[in-house]
Every structure is written in C-alpha cells, then in structure tokens.
C-alpha cells in the first residue's frame, strides 16, 4: 500500500485584480510524492524534502494507494520537484490528476456540477 501526499499551496498575488492559484507539489514525471509505509512515510518525506511534515486526513482510499492531505514548510525543493498550478493539469499531463481533482473538490474549489 502506498501513500500519495497532497501538498497544495495557495499562491497569492499582490495585485488585487489577479486571481489566486492553487499549486500542487509534483515530481519531474508530474506525479504526487508517493511513499511506501514500510520505510516510514514521515521519515521518507522528511529525508527527501528536509522539512517536517504534518499529516491531515486520508481523503481517498483505493486498492493499493491512499491519498492524504499534508502540510510542510519546504524552504528549497530538491531537484526534480516543482509546484504546478491546478489549471495546468490534465489527465494526459498528470497520472495523478483524478486524485488532485478530488482534493480540489474536498478543499471546496471545484464541484462536479460545474464541470
């Protein structure tokens, strides 16, 4: 069983007219951080990102993977990691799009009836 970590960040702009953007932490293959619990999810994350992590709740459970909200103050991203705005994500661009879309629903930013 693997755990996909959802780290969402709200980017605010100083310009009042510009909209805020929600971004997600993804690797160079545009996938969410994924860890196996046998190595300790917290320990693996903290070793990779050099930051303490706080877990929220598991919002999605499937056969071999869980998705869990988390927060962390990452000062510098390791090589091959970047933040991607939700507006730039598609199913063909990101294998974890369905999980991220569900996270956006849980956060209250999108709804199925608006799509």
Image (cartoon, rainbow, N blue to C red):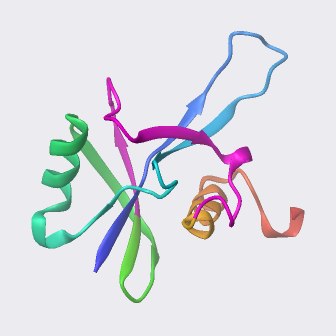
- Give the residue at x 71% y 46%: 88
Side of 40 relative to 3 (left or right): left
Name the quadrant of the C terminus: bottom right
Side of 21 relative to 18 (left or right): left
- Residue 111, quarter of the rendered image: bottom right
- Residue 98, quarter of the rendered image: bottom right
Residue 13 on image: x %, y %: 68, 17
Name the quadrant of the N terminus: bottom left
- Give the residue at x 41% y 41%: 81
Residue 93 on image: x %, y %: 65, 58
Side of 67 relative to 52 (left or right): right
Residue 86 on image: x %, y %: 67, 47
Magenta part of the chain: 68-94
79 is within the stretch colored magenta: yes
Instruction: Please say if 26 is above or below 65.
Output: above
106 is within the stretch colored magenta: no
- Give the residue at x 60% y 60%: 94
């Amino acid at each position: 069983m693997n755990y996909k970590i959802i780290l969402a960040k709200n980017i605010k702009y100083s310009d009042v007219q510009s909209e805020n953007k929600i971004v997600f932490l993804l690797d160079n293959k545009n996938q969410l951080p994924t860890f196996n619990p046998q190595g300790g999810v917290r320990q693996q994350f903290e070793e990779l990102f050099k930051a303490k992590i706080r877990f929220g709740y598991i919002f999605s459970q499937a056969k071999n993977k869980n998705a869990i909200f988390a927060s962390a103050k990452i000062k510098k991203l390791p090589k091959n990691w970047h933040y991607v705005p939700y507006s730039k994500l598609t199913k063909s661009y990101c294998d974890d799009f369905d999980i991220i879309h569900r996270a956006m629903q849980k956060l209250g930013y999108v709804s199925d009836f608006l799509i």
